[in-house]
Amino acid sequence: MLQNKEYRLTRRLLLSTLASAVTSIAISAQTPPKKPQLVVGIVVEGLQSEYLDLLDQYFCDGGFKRLLRDGAVIDNIEYGPGADAAAATAMIYTGTGPAVNGISASTVYDAARQTTYPVLLDPSKIGNYTNETYSPSAILVSTLSDEVRMDNVGTGYVHSIAPDAIQSIIMTGHAGNSAFWLNDITGRWATTTYYKDVPPVITNRNFSAPLSARLDTLEWTPSLQLEQYPDVPDYKKIYPFHHTFRSNDIERFAKFKQSAPMNREITSIALDYISSMHLGTHGAMDMLNVYYTLAPFPGVKDADTRLELLDSYLKLDIELQRLLKAVDAAADIKNTVIFVAGTPQRNSDKPDDPKWAVPYGEFFPRRAISLLNMYLMALHGTGDWVTGYHNGQFYLNKDLIKEKGLDLRAIRSDVADFLLRMSGVCDAWTVDDILAARVGSRPDLVRRNTNVNHSGDVFISVNPGWEIVEEHPGGMSRRILSRAQATTAPFIIMAPQIIPTRIDTPVDVLSIAPTVARVLRIRSPNAAANPTISTIFAPINKK
């Protein structure tokens, strides 16, 4: 009898224990993982997949190698034609193109005043540590950073650091806390009073360790013995490069911003942000955006910048290792999302040596404007028919055309036909052709990358290898080398629910924002309509 009671008691205890265990497992299976607490967004101007492959054996274990090993890698994010660094960054963060987000290029043209201006110029704001006046008001839609802030009802922090103002502000968006960049004149870290936060780390750097006091001592020399660099011609291996930024050079800060040492400055500030602000540790989602550059260095004397470019990758690899190590130390990696987005490589502004006899010529937009005005005056009477040129686009005097009672579309078509007959012009089309999707092999991409509020009336393409010589008052001129280039770059995302994989088929850049938003479990930016890159997500067990 006693044995039966003991048996029944043991049986009840066992069943109770099993029931509790099953309940715990069920509850655990139904409880979603915690939202990410730290998001690190990294944009790298000029990042290219082929260089990641070429230099793989030279990279340290904690930088590019770690990202390529533990993240999902898309080799070719497609941006479409005409996307400079500003337009590309805006597409990454908004999930839509310039036609909708408002950012078609870093500078745009004011036809009424016949002058160019930064796309984010806002005279109603005041610069902080600078006389530059910017705000994100020209970004017409929400960004990833905005959605992070709104999801946390403002309890999380969003900060951005970049060499230039436009990229920094785009990454911070409308709702972020701060956006800092390096001023070209003073070398101080600057911002706009649109943003209310000025982190102590910035104030300390500007007053205790300003770049202006250190720049004379900074130099850029090779990381390796010259014979160790792959794919570099022998003549480049005779003398190692040695770049300095002396105080007698009025452009030293601007040049420094396009050099490999600039990336170290960016990382150092990012580390200060992470440690001093305890990002990712206070219960709300924080976002830190950093912008690195692999742009062609303007201090190279010839057109071959390969040695400096390869060295820039090696030095950036070290900076990524520093940054990722700091993130590991500061936040739980299980609640951290890191993404790296490259933007298309910028062309070098130096032509090939004439001794190679590569076809070459010069196209002068001001001369083209003069010829166009003479042509249109012969047809329609006196007047300034063409008001300006900017970034491959001619702007017509719409008020004069309206005053004369002429058909604007017909005038545009005449101008395009006239320009097409000029030496060096290999193609010309009107904005009407773009809106009607009659331009290029992918007219949809051309259309989405054209913002009609900023665009000219007639677009041209100059022969590759030719220089576009933009002449300015005072005898100054700017030379831009025309060269066809790929408009793709890699994208890497590393997060707990992401499958380490590599995708070599092209993916639309507009899928980045909704993909990152899905990882963060927040809303996509309000204009992001593309599907996510679903193949990189781990399958969910629904049993």
Image: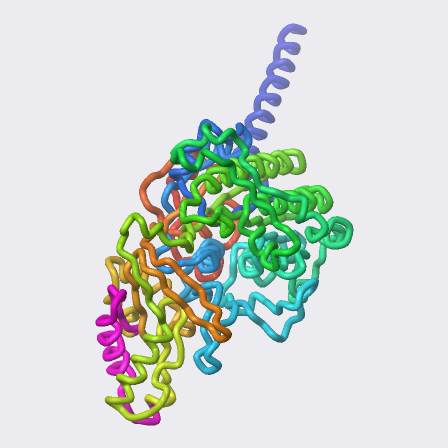
Q: Is residue 105 visible?
A: yes
Instruction: Relative to 13, say whether 522 is above or below.
Output: below
Position of residue 499 in the picture relative to residue 263 (left or right)? left
- Give coordinates of residue 396: x percent, y percent: 35, 81
| Residue 456 point in image, percent of width and height | 37, 74
Q: Is residue 294 left or right of residue 443?
A: right
For residue 406, what is the image quadrant? bottom left
The answer to whether residue 35 is visible is no
Residue at x 43% of width, y 48% of height: 302
Q: The N terminus is located in which quarter?
A: top right
Q: Position of residue 92 (x, y in %)?
A: 46, 53
- Measured from the top left, where is residue 218 in percent x and y? 64, 44
Total labels drawn:
0
Q: How is the image coloured?
A: rainbow
**Which residue shows up at 50% across the image and 54% down it?**
523
Q: Quadrant of residue 326?
A: top right
Is 250 covered by the magenta stretch? no
Q: Nearer the viewer, residue 183 or 266?
A: 183
**Magenta span covers which residues?**
402-431
Q: Which is more toward the observer, 463 or 153? A: 463
Is 423 colored magenta in this rendering? yes
Question: Residue at the right extreme?
Answer: 208
The one nearer the camera, 33 or 488, is 488
At 35% from the left edge and 51% from the top edge, which residue is drawn?
352
Q: Residue at x 77, y 54 (%)?
A: 207
Q: Quadrant of the C terminus?
A: top left
Q: Is 67 located above or below residue 418 in the figure? A: above
